[in-house]
Amino acid sequence: MKRKIEKTEEIDCLLSPKLAGTTFSGVVLAALAAVVLFSIITGATGLKSDSDVYLYLSYLLPSLVAAAITLIVLKATRTEFAVIGGFFKFNFKKRYIAVILLTITGMLFGLGELNNQFVKFLNVFGYVESPSYLPDYSVLNLILTIFVIAVVPPVVEETIFRGIIQSGLKKSGYISVILTAATFALYHLSPAKTIYQFVVGLLFSLIYLKSGSIIPAMIVHFLNNLLIILSIYFNIFAFVESYKVITTVFGLLCVIGALVIVFTDKTEVERSMDKTDWLAFLINASAGFFLGTLIWVITVFVH
């Protein structure tokens, strides 16, 4: 009986606002550490920016460091790693299959233009978005690119944000959706994608809140990254530019359709987080919010 009580306490620790805030601060530090580590590795090895290894490392390293920091946080709080398995529930309602399809369609065709308009707004302040590159096409490069961009990041990020962080805020109900989306957008340290990632984060977090599983959001995250890769290699969305207004409206209607299905799900949402919980989260997340905001401001306004 004693051991069962200890396990229960460990689970409560995993789902606490304090751990949610600490995890967020940890992964923001991880994002900065990945930048430093990447510079050290490339400097020491002489990797050229156009080499395949350089590109793979630039995509893979942030996720690996974030995962490592998260495991360190869980270890420091004496949380059993096996508890993370509880996030991966496949027993969600069938309606979320339709939500997955509508959300990914909406992201690809409706929300992309939102990102483009925000980049234009930042351009007013002199900000120029750094282009992203993929290795030259080959079957092997395609497989490796899918793994480092479409598989690893969705698994790591959804486990951290929708799993650990949002679960720690679950008693705040819909407010947990906003907070998790904000942390998700800030973590990426990419000003150009801030609005897009915040809106996407809202969708992912809402789906998780109502479905009770990170799997639907993880699938959407995977499909989004996968289809972007395929569009770059094979230009499968070439028609979008010619029919931008139509595809954007269609995409936004898909997002609305997904939201309707989610909000008509009668699953009850907890709304009992008190001020102590808020304070615990904000105190422990403050380092992450401060560093993330600082890097954002420097990136946009310092040239």
Image (cartoon, rainbow, N blue to C red):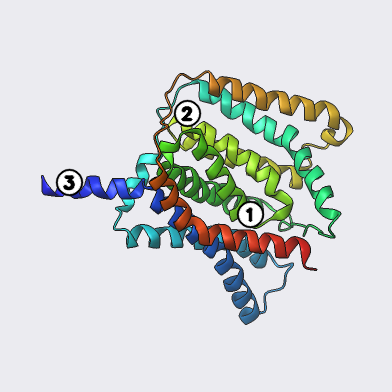
Amino acid identity at mark 1: Leu
N-terminal label among 3 and 2: 3
Q: Are marks 3 and 1 in contact (CB under 8 Å)?
A: no
Relative to 258, residue 40 above or below:
below
Is residue 187 toward the left or the right of residue 158 in the image? right
Q: Which mark is residue 269?
A: none
Amino acid identity at mark 2: Lys
Q: Quadrant of the C terminus?
A: bottom right
Look at 74% across and 42% down and name the residue there: 231
Is residue 243 toward the left or the right of residue 271 in the image? right
List the residue tagged with mark 1: 140
In this rendering, which labeled residue sits more in front, label 3 or label 1? 3
SS class of the residue under badge 1?
A: helix
Amino acid identity at mark 3: Ile
Relative to 86, residue 125 above or below:
below
Q: Is there any visible trace of residue 62 in the rendered image?
A: yes
Furthest toward the front, the residue is 275
N-terminal label among 3 and 1: 3
Distance (Cα) linking label 3 and label 1: 49 Å
